[in-house]
Image (cartoon, grey):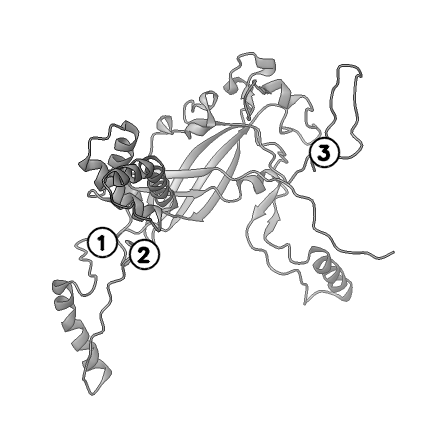
């Protein structure tokens, strides 16, 4: 017999909810090179000391800005560069999903008592056995409050730009190639979606091709990335880090190494055993006073948001909770209500489906010989 290490079984973990912020607070100052072009200039200096060399470089800056050989941004007010998203969200679990008392257990029928799986759908919808049921009538009155802090990112806006360019290429490239072939010109080969968009959008504006979808995408691209940066299109986003971990009684934050250098010999031996048992898994701590909620089903509301910037200032966002919007991919049954956003059931802890049995017409229960999905 020989033992061989193998890969572990795959498991699934729900993603944390993502907050997307738009408006004046999401304004990011222009950065050198953000358009993909780094305009640099080598300025020769001849000075006997560092101080004189710095004086020569400072004196050369206006000339660089005038001739365009280097990128210079003029700032006439205090800069505002939001860096971190600090948020406080309240989670209202569905009744039976989270025990409200220490001696209460989880209701095994709570999930099917609140949700059902419609035909031709891939996600659960509110209502038991297909009956219409209000989500707001089945949530606990006392929420669990979660606080998080994450670094903001403009990824949402950049991702939207890439998807628009890819969609325009998919819609217009075959038509453009056909038009070039009719004209006796070989169609160009584009190296990227951005390169294709630059050519296809100009060609589309000069022809009489009737495609309202392409026209709307090109207009949106212009408003987002070519216009004068209107406030309604300034977007920053970030996930509510550690939300799923908090539901599993874990605090997502780096922990100190396990050690007790000043303790007695017995304490040090115990710390050594714990350090060996824990190993490198020190990325989360323990939240002993949190309730264990293995299924994140219920509703969530954003209570407070603060944006600290890279200069040490901060701004508390004053927003109307009734105007909070949910992503369209959450479906018609997940519209916000009074600032609360319904959450479809998700397993908060790492989980896997170990075995599946099939119901047949001839037997009551058919047990598979081996697990179908693990």
Q: Earlier in the sequence, mark 2 or mark 3?
A: 2
Q: Nearer the viewer, residue 91 or 45?
A: 45
Specify the label residue 78 is tagged with: 1
Specify the label residue 311 is tagged with: 2
Q: Earlier in the sequence, mark 1 or mark 2?
A: 1
Q: Distance between the residues labelled 1 and 2?
A: 10 Å
Q: Nearer the viewer, residue 191 or 350?
A: 191
User: Helix or strand or loop: what does disc 1 sit on?
Assistant: loop
Q: Which of 113 and 220 is in front in this view?
A: 220
Residue 154 in percent (x, y) is at 36, 46
| Left or right relative to 212: residue 192 | right
Q: In which quarter of the image is the C terminus?
A: top right
Q: In which quarter of the image is the N terminus?
A: bottom right
Is there a contact, CB below 8 Å, between mark 2 and mark 3? no
Q: Which of marks 3 and 1 is nearer the N terminus?
A: 1
Residue under label 3, please give it. 372
């Amino acid at each position: 017999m020989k033992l061989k290490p193998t890969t572990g079984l795959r498991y699934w973990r729900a993603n944390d909810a993502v907050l997307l912020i738009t408006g004046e607070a999401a304004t990011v100052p222009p950065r050198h090179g953000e358009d993909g072009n780094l305009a640099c200039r080598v300025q020769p200096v001849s000075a006997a000391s560092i101080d004189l060399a710095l004086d020569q470089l400072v004196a050369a800056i206006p000339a660089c800005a005038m001739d365009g050989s280097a990128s210079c941004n003029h700032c006439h007010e205090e800069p505002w560069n939001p860096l971190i998203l600090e948020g406080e969200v309240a989670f209202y679990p569905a009744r039976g999903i989270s025990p409200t008392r220490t001696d209460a257990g989880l209701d095994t029928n709570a999930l099917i008592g609140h949700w059902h799986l419609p035909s031709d759908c891939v996600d659960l919808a509110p209502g038991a056995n297909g009956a219409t049921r209000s989500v707001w009538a089945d949530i606990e009155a006392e929420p669990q409050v979660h606080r998080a802090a994450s670094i903001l990112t403009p990824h949402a806006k950049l991702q939207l730009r890439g998807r628009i360019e890819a969609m325009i290429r998919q819609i217009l490239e075959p038509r453009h190639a056909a038009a070039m072939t009719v004209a006796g010109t070989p169609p160009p080969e584009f190296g990227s979606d951005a390169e294709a968009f630059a050519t296809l959008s100009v060609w589309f504006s000069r022809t009489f091709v009737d495609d309202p979808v392409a026209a709307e995408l090109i207009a949106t691209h212009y408003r987002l990335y070519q216009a004068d940066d209107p406030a309604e299109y300034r977007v920053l986003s970030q996930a509510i880090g550690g939300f799923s971990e908090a539901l599993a009684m874990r605090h997502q934050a780096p922990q100190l190494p396990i050690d007790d250098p000043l303790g007695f010999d017995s304490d040090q031996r115990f710390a050594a055993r714990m350090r060996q048992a824990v190993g490198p898994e020190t990325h989360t701590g323990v939240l002993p006073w949190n309730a264990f909620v293995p299924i994140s089903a219920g509703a969530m509301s954003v209570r407070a948001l603060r944006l600290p910037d890279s200069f040490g200032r901060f701004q508390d966002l004053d927003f109307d909770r009734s105007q909070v919007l949910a992503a369209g991919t959450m479906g018609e049954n997940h519209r916000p209500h009074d600032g609360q956003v319904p959450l479809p059931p998700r397993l908060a802890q790492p989980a896997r489906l170990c075995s599946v049995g099939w119901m047949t017409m001839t037997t009551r229960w058919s047990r598979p010989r081996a697990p179908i999905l693990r």
